[in-house]
Amino acid sequence: MSRILLVRHGQASWGAEDYDQLSALGESQARTLGAALAAQGITPDVLISGKMLRHAQTAVGVCEAAGWELPVTTDEGWNEFDHLQVLARHPAPEGVDLMADPRAFQSWFEAATLRWTGGEHDDYDESFAHFSARASAALDRAIGVLEPKGTAVVFTSGGPIAWAAATRLDGDAHLWLRLNQVTINASVTSFVVGARGATLLAFNEHTHLSPDHQTYR
C-alpha cells in the first residue's frame, strides 16, 4: 500500500503583524521533524505544499534536515481557512487581553469557529462547506499522483489535516472542531492508501518534539 503523511507547519509568528511566517521555534520544529523522518528511513516519492508561506518554510526546513532533494508541488487546496476573518465575524470578549490570556483566546476562537461551521451565516468569503470540499479534493489529488507503494509528504495546516482525519473516522464538523483544537505544530498525521482509498493510521504524532517544543499555533 501507499502512504500519505500530512505535516502541520511549524509554529507561525503568533501575535506578529504577519502571522504567515515561521517563528524561530517553528523553524527548529521543522528541522527536528526532518531529522526524525530521515532516521525512520522515510524517503518520499512526492512532496506537496499548500501555498502559504509557513507551509513552504516548513517544507524547506524538513527537506534540508532530512536530505530530501525532490521538487515540491504547490496545491492551494491544502491552504488553511481564513481564521482572521472567522474571528472577525464573532465579537471578541471585552476587557480581556486575548494575547496575554490563552484560555480567553481559545474560548473566543472556539465560539467563532462554531459560528462558521454551523452554516447559518453567509458573511464569509469561504464557507465551511467549501473549505471542507476543497480539503477533501486536495487529499484526493494527492492520492491520485501516488504510485503503488509510494509515499507522499504534504505540508499543510491544522484545518485540512483535521478534516482529512475526521472524514476517515466518519465524522463531521463537530469532530473536526475537536481534532483541530489539538493538532500540534510539526506533527504528522498518516494514512495508508489501498483499494478502499485512504485509511487513517495515526493522528497528530509528535513524539519527535520535546515538551518545550510542543505548540498549538
Image (tube, rainbow, N blue to C red):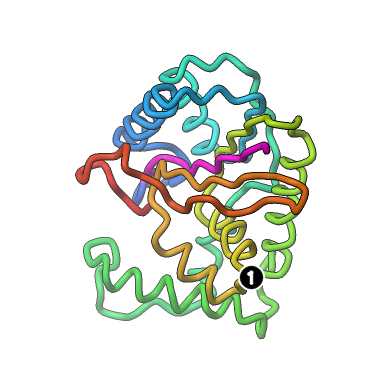
Instruction: State whether residue 172 is above or below residue 157.
Output: below
Measured as percent of width and height from the top left, residue 208 is found at: 32, 37
Instruction: State whether residue 24 is above or below residue 167.
Output: above
Q: Which amino acid does label 1 sit on?
A: Asp
Neighbour tally class for label 1: few under 14, some 14-19, many 20 plus, Cα within 10 Å: few
In the image, what residue occupies the spot 45% across and 79% down? 111
Judge by depth and name the residue closer to the eye, 143 or 112: 143
Instruction: State whether residue 170 is above or below residue 71.
Output: below
Q: In which quarter of the image is the N terminus?
A: top right
Question: What count of labels does the image hold?
Answer: 1
The reply to whether the magenta stretch includes residue 50 is no
Q: Mark 1 points at which residue?
A: 170
For numbered disc 1, what is the local secondary structure?
Answer: loop
In the image, what residue occupies the spot 42% across and 27% down? 40
Judge by depth and name the residue closer to the eye, 125 or 166: 166
Task: Classify residue 171 by image quadrant.
Answer: bottom right
Instruction: State whether residue 33 is above or below residue 127.
Output: above
- Give the extent of the magenta segment: 1-13
In the image, what residue occupies the spot 43% across and 46% down? 19
Judge by depth and name the residue closer to the eye, 15 or 212: 212
Measured as percent of width and height from the top left, residue 76 is found at: 69, 43
Task: Classify residue 194 by image quadrant.
Answer: top right
174 left or right, relative to 110: right
Measured as percent of width and height from the top left, residue 137 is found at: 76, 52
In the image, what residue occupies the spot 26% across and 41% down? 213
The reply to whether the magenta stretch includes residue 11 is yes
